[in-house]
Amino acid sequence: MKEDIQKEIDAGCVWKAKELLRFEIGQKEYDKQLFEDYAHVLSLMKDDVNAGIYYFLSGKRTKQYQSKIDLFFKVKAKKKLGSLTSQFPQSAKYETIDEFDEPMKSELKSLGLINSPSGGANYTNNRQLITKQSAFDWGIVIIYFLIASLFVGAGTILYWVFQLIVNLGS
């Protein structure tokens, strides 16, 4: 475990260690040691179900880790891989079971999960957030808004000029 994380735990600031690790998980690619450290912190916080997720992703198996992994599967595992991986951090959201390393791959297969596009296809790190079609659609909306603004603005200016002329004539 990293020194700064261990210092926070030793100082009794387990929640701060959790936040530091959670931030780091969001910034990095798949990192088994980081997952194990985060699971350890979650265990210290008595969050055994979520600790099981990260012990599972760490790929390490001990009796203590396995009991938390089993609890996670008992509580969270459904029929589709997508239902399960939706609870994983971004770097661990794979489309198929075969993309996982051992022992995760064989454990997922033993659960009888069905590969489901909802699990990985929508969550891969390579996803394109704005497609060409959606950019085109937004462009059309912006153009309509600008044209409508011109009509409203022109009407307001004409009204203002008319009021100015009427007030000067009075």
Image (tube, rainbow, N blue to C red):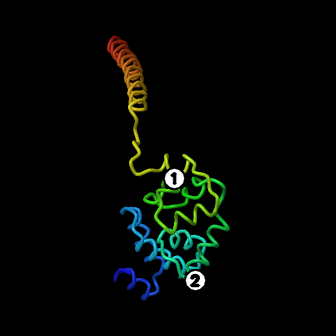
Q: Secondary structure at mark 1?
A: loop
Q: CA distance from mark 1 to mark 2?
A: 27 Å
Q: Which of pointers 1 and 2 lies earlier in the amino acid sequence?
A: 2
Q: Position of residue 9 (x, y in %)?
A: 44, 84
Left or right for 31, reference 112: left
Q: Identify the residue shown where x is 33% and y is 13%.
A: 165
**Mark 2 belongs to which amino acid?**
Lys
Left or right for 115, reference 167: right
Q: Please count the marks in the image.
A: 2
Q: Position of residue 58 (x, y in %)?
A: 47, 71
Q: Identify the residue shown where x is 34% and y is 11%.
A: 169
Q: Is residue 125 above or below residue 34?
A: above
Mark 1 in CB contact with mark 2 (< 8 angstroms): no
Residue wearing tag 2: 63
Q: Quadrant of the C terminus?
A: top left
**Mark 1 belongs to which amino acid?**
Thr
Q: Is residue 68 above or below residue 9?
A: above
Q: Quadrant of the N terminus?
A: bottom left
Q: Secondary structure at mark 2?
A: helix
Q: Identify the residue shown where x is 39% and y is 42%.
A: 128
Residue wearing tag 1: 96
Q: Position of residue 144 (x, y in %)?
A: 41, 22
Q: Residue furthest bottom?
A: 10
